[in-house]
Image (cartoon, rainbow, N blue to C red):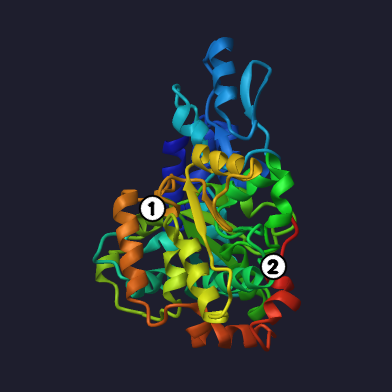
Amino acid sequence: MTFEALYNRLLKSNVAGSMAQELDLVRKQGYDPHHLSCLLSPEKHPVIIRTDSCCCESKQQEQCLARCYFDALFVQDGEIAIDPALCVGCGDCIRNCDAKKLTESRDILPALNALRNAQAPVYAMIAPAFINQYTEAVTPGKLRAAFKKIGFAGMVEVALFADILTLKEALEFDKNIQTEKDYQLTSCCCPMWIGMIKKVYAQLIPHVPAAVSPMVACGRSIKKIHPGAVTVFIGPCMAKKAEAREPDIADSTDFVLTFQEIQDVFDYAGIDLAQMEEDDRDHSSKAGRIYAGTGGVSEAVRATVSRINPLKQITVKTRHADGVPACKQMLNDIMAGNGGANFFEGMGCVGGCVGGPKALISRDEGRENVIRYGAEASYDTPIDNPYVIALLHQLGLDTIESLLEHSDIFVRKL
């Protein structure tokens, strides 16, 4: 039985409420214990898992190792293995594996068990790239209703917390960028970008604000407001699975699913997303919604700095890169003194989050959807968004400046 066949068989039985019986049958039929462990206890395995023995010659294995930007692959007992401490979950090794023996971790089975057995509310945290991933007929309100139908207490748009991180980065820029030689690297969104800086370009860390990603900010905020709550992030990114396991921020997100994983649940549950009733509660601004596309963070911060301090003499001059090679080139340019900007944004995937490896639609279509959704927002920047201000007050922050002074919930140290 292949890994994919086992995944689908167990997921279908889990949704139907008969997984215990199905597990008994699977064990009797000669399942692969490694596959089963990966599906039932994904936290015990790397984010990228090997589904079968490596059949490549040693020379080809060397080529595989060389392809990893983060040196996370190594050979152990003649097999390609993954170092969880170095792997950021970019997924390039999966795409480049000619033998197709690598795949991503699946968190859906333990997530469904938590949903079924939780003693506290379980919240779906949907990535900003979600708009129209499930066809144009599936509005945010219909998707929220679908999550509630399968047992979630609600769906929270992570874009609202992208708003808060935009505000924090804009405040950091206004405070720290005082001369033409000063510059700032965004700390938001992309774990591949941050992983690259931490592991390869550590000299640049002083230029990165001490901020968490919107996913982490969302999870921590939910848990502060609803103690004991379970948080489940859903997006197009495999690297988020690795980010959620990092020790200093593992308190925020209990499970990370891809768009495909949750679509599989809807399919097996017989839920037609397009036919769901509307449950519409959109509170994010344009700034937070456009995070999912390349250049979105830069534009959001630029607009917010202008609102915070319209008289600031040093304007935001942005440069952004997408895809790991382009990000490395931009970082090399900064190191050589040829950055050409004072605010730098990197996205590990071409096109930004909408180009993530587990997106359900093309990155061009995803980008168009994100831009349109941003244009439909009632507020342009987070400082104009009353929901952001109300949420900050709920979290104990009386002023926006408190984000720089007393915002432990939104801070991490690289």
User: Residue 305 in the image: x percent, y percent?
Assistant: 55, 74
Question: Quick check: can you spot residue 47?
Answer: no
Q: Is residue 223 above or below residue 50?
A: below
Q: Quadrant of the N terminus?
A: top left
- Mark 1 and mark 2 in contact (Cβ < 8 Å)? no
Q: Disc 2 residue type?
A: Asn
Kind of residue at disc 1: Asp
Whole-percent x, y for residue 281 in the image: 41, 81
Tell me the SS state at disc 2: helix
Image point (31%, 51%), residue name: 364
Q: List the residue tagged with mark 1.
A: 264
Q: Secondary structure at mark 1?
A: helix
Left or right of 372? Residue 241 is: right
Q: Quadrant of the C terminus?
A: bottom right
Q: Residues within 10 Å of mark 2 (few under 14, many from 20)?
A: some
Q: CA distance from mark 2 to mark 1?
A: 46 Å
Query: Is 410 on the left or on the right of 192, as rendered?
Result: right
In the foreground, 139 or 408: 408
- What number is the disc on residue 176? 2
Could you say which is closer to the camera, residue 123 or residue 309? 309
Sequence-earlier tag: 2 or 1:
2
Q: Which mark is residue 203?
A: none
Residue 372 in the image: state x and y as whole percent: 30, 67
Q: Is residue 39 visible?
A: yes
Q: On the image, which quarter does residue 67 sit in?
A: top right
Point 69% across, 52% down: residue: 246
| Nearer to the camera, 363 or 30 | 363
Q: Position of residue 362 (x, y in %)?
A: 31, 48
- Give the tally of numbered discs: 2
* Quadrant in the rendering for residue 218: bottom right
222 vs 334: above or below: below
